[in-house]
Amino acid sequence: MPQTQEEIDAAPTEVTKGMASYNLPGKPGDTPNWHNQLAAAGADNMISFSPFDYVHMLEGIPTFVAYGSNAVTGPGAQKLYDKIDAPKELSVVEGAGHFDLYWKSEYVDPTVDHISNFLKG
């Protein structure tokens, strides 16, 4: 993850830039014991993992999916939602990026209300 402003500006993806805006020291997701390293032992699992291989495990289980309209992860979240065979509800949060839904109250609060209403059914 980039740590300096120069590294952030040069980051190749919006996800990488978003990680820095959320996880760096002094940011909302700062975790003091976290080390800015990739665990080589977990890289194979991360690269080969696909949530679509496990969507069948959600069959019949009420499922709520939310993603930001500006999130690079949006198409994958939509694909997952489309494959779920269960009572489900979708919330596309207008204007939000991936990391915005972690902590920005203008995006989180309405999403939590939507989830709450879904669960109350």
Image (cartoon, helix red, strand yellow):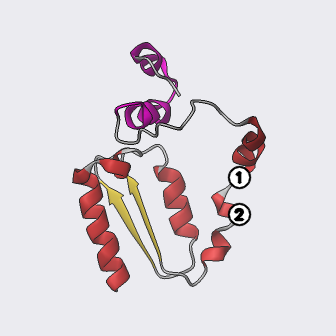
**x and y, in percent, of residue 36 in the image:** 57, 30
**x and y, in percent, of residue 53 in the image:** 71, 63
Position of residue 21 relative to residue 62, above or below, is: above
- Asked if labels 1 and 2 touch by Cβ distance under 8 angstroms, the answer is yes
Q: Can you identify the residue that label 1 sits on?
A: 49
Which residue does the image show at 30% across and 66% down from the upper left?
112
Position of residue 49 relative to residue 120, above or below, is: above
**What amino acid is at disc 1?**
Phe
Q: Which mark is residue 53?
A: 2
Which residue does the image show at 49% across and 31% down from the upper left?
16
**What amino acid is at disc 2?**
Asp
Range of residues picked out in magenta: 5-26
Main SS, magenta region, reads helix
Is 24 on the left-hand or right-hand side of 111? right
Q: SS class of the residue under badge 1? A: loop
Which residue does the image show at 34% across and 41% down from the upper left?
28
Question: From the viewer's perspective, is the residue at label 2 or at label 1 nearer?
Answer: 1
In the image, farthest residue toward the top: 6
Q: SS class of the residue under badge 2? A: helix
Q: Which one is in front, 43 or 59?
A: 43
The number of numbered discs placed on residues in the rendered structure image is 2
| Quadrant of the image containing the C terminus | bottom left
Is 13 on the left-hand or right-hand side of 83? left
Position of residue 87 relative to residue 5, above or below, is: below
Asked where in the image residue 21 lies, by quadrant, the reply is top left
**x and y, in percent, of residue 8 in the image:** 44, 21
